[in-house]
Structures are given as structure tokens and as C-alpha cells.
Amino acid sequence: MRILGIETSFDDTGVAIYDSQFGILINELCSQTHIHNEHGGVLPELASREHLNTLASLIQYTLNKVKISLNDIDGIAYTAGPGLSGTLLIGATLSFSLSFSCNIPIIPIHHMEGHLLTPMIENNYLSFPFIGLLISGKHTQLIYAYQLGKYKILGATLDDAIGETFDKIAKVLGLGYPGGLALSNFARQGISKTFLFPKPMKYHNDLNFSFSGLKTFTINLINKNINNIQLLYNIAKEFENTIISMLLHKCKIIFEQTGLSKLIVSGGVSTNQRIIKKLNYMMNKYHGKIFISRLDFCTDNAAMIAYVGSIYVKIKSFNIPNIFIQPRWLISH
Ligand code: KG4
Ligand code: ZN
């Protein structure tokens, strides 16, 4: 069985094919970063136009590259939400057109469920239940994944997302957009504990996060020390340390309370090696294991959409009469 996956929830156009025997056959991505970079953030209208310019030819290119025709596709899985309504509509409309004209089943997929289950693509023995930590440019969520489709959000950010916070600090430091990786590299040259940072929500025992106070504190500190590069490195380092200790604190509460032993970390921020190293260390203490995806599956991609589509198409038939998107789709039921 082969599933064509289509991802257009935000600023990346993704097309991939999952084969139930051979795994991901191809995973293509057209990033719009260079277009949005000069605006310091994603402009929804521009993002929609770019998807419109790119998607049809990217589908054609992807199929041609692996010499597969639409006749060999058993399902079209597309991201139906959450995301920007304009960009979601481009993917949904083209998916429906292909499904309708070629009589291929269509499967709407939750973008965050895609992120959550991605590590399963390469870990056949990974099974439910587990805790998911979704850390991306738009989301920060701790999820109890009981079984397929049954998820409970244990905690989430009350304001900015973790990746968004990295991006905003990086922007003030002139490190470009999105600046999470650049900021983390910048912080490598810093010395820890030269500044005392607040740890918002750390002393609350609920599982929510808040990053906006930390963001404002960091930006003010940067502005006060803007002419001293070493102090800027130190600030970046302590910012990253603070983020890590916030994540560890919430994860510890969960693993102490639930006794679970599996942590899946997903989303663009999971490419941060310092975060993963510390979480790994923590999971060792709980005799547990951490699961992450390979790098190109961590950030937005269509492989995760095709993969989750391949799971659902086996157990459920979708009968969706109209083009369907849900920009504010919640993962929990
Ligand atoms: O999952 P993703 O590609 O898009 C969303 O669904 O949001 O995540 C992108 C986010 C951006 O905010 C980016 O700055 C952040 O992931 N990011 C990082 C790192 N690499 C990417 N943040 C911190 N450290 C990194 N190494
Ligand atoms: Zn994402």
C-alpha cells in the first residue's frame, strides 16, 4: 500500500510517499523561509500564494522521481489542521481534486498527530502508551498518548510557543528567521550562570508553560548589554538553560506521577541537541527511553502525514463530501 502525503499547514510545502513495505520512499520539501525571512515572520497571504505556485509541480516532481503514477497510490493523506486556513485550503483543495478525479481515498490528518507519531516510522517496536513532548515554532504541548487517536493534553503554553520564543530572541540578536538553531549555536560560546534568570511556572505543579515573561526579561537584558558580545553569548546561554530546566521540570512531574517509561520528543525544537541530551539524561534516571525522529522528520514535513495516513486508511474509511479543513483542530478528545 502506498500513501501520498501532502503538508501545507504553514510555510513549508511538503510531499511524500509512504510504502507499507519499504517505508518512506521519498520526502520532498519546498521551504519558504527565504521569502519570509526578510519580513521577520510568516505572512499568511504570501505563504498561501507560494503553496499555490509550488504544490502541483512538487507532487508531479515527487511522483516522477520515484517513477510512481497516481494509479499506484492507495490513499491521499493531507494536513487538515491545525494551521493557517489559507495555506491548509491549498493542500486540501488539491488533495480533493486528485482524490475525486482519480478515485483515490482521501484521509485528513492532524498535523500534531503527525509530529507525535513520526518517531514510530523508524522505531517499529515503539508502542502506546507514551508521553509526547511537542516543541515547535507554533506549539508547546505535553501529551498523554493512550492509544491511536486517544490523546490527552496534560500541559501547553499559556502564551508564546517555545520555538517562537527562540525566534523572537534570535531576531533581537540579528540572527535571522527562524533563528532557533542560530541562537543555540550562538549560546555555545556563552558561560552559564553569569546571569540569574527567572524560571516562570517552574514552581507551579501544573504542567503548563509560559514563555512570554522569559522572552521580555531576555530581550531587556540583551538591550542593556547590546555592546558586549561575550555578555550576549552568556545571556543566550542562560536563556537556553532556563528553557531546558522548564522542560525538565514538567517532564519530571509527569514521569514521577505516571510511572511511564517512554518519551517522544517531536517538532522543530527537538533538533536542539542540548535539549535532547538533558532529556535523555533525565529519562535514564527513570529507567525510560526517549524517542526522536531523524532530523528531516523533526521539522514540518509530509512524511509524517503520509505515515499517519497509512495507519488510518487501514482501520477507518473516510467519507468526506466536501473540502475539509479545521484550522483550530484540537488533538485531544
Ligand atoms: O516544527 P517546525 O518546523 O515548525 C512548526 O510546526 O512550528 O519548528 C520550527 C521551529 C522554529 O521556531 C525554529 O526556530 C525552531 O523550530 N528550531 C529550534 C532549533 N532548530 C529549529 N529551536 C531551538 N533550537 C534549535 N536547534
Ligand atoms: Zn509542525
Image (tube, rainbow, N blue to C red):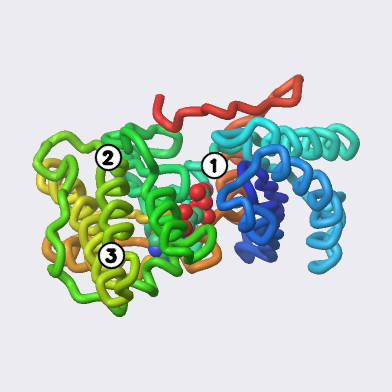
- Labels 3 & 1 near each other (Cβ < 8 A): no
Name the disc covering residue 111, or none. Answer: 1
Q: Residue 183: horizontal and vertical position, in percent?
A: 40, 66
* Residue at screen point 37% across, 57% down: 126
Q: As drawn, which residue projects farthest toward the right? A: 101
Question: Residue type at mark 3?
Answer: Asn
Name which quarter of the figure residue 211 lies in.
top left
Q: Residue at x 31, y 41 (%)?
A: 212
Where does residue 33 sit, x and y in percent of width and height? Answer: 63, 58
| Residue 315 makes an appearance in the image | no
Quarter that holds the C terminus: top left
Q: Earlier in the sequence, mark 3 or mark 1?
A: 1
**Residue 204 position (above or below residue 20):** above
Query: In front here: 193 or 241?
Result: 193
What residue is shown with label 3? 225
Mark 1 CB near ligand 2 (8 Å cut): yes
Instruction: Give the label on residue 210, or none.
Output: 2
Say whether residue 240 is visible: yes
Quote the CA–CA distance across marks 2 and 1: 23 Å
Q: Amino acid at mark 1?
A: His
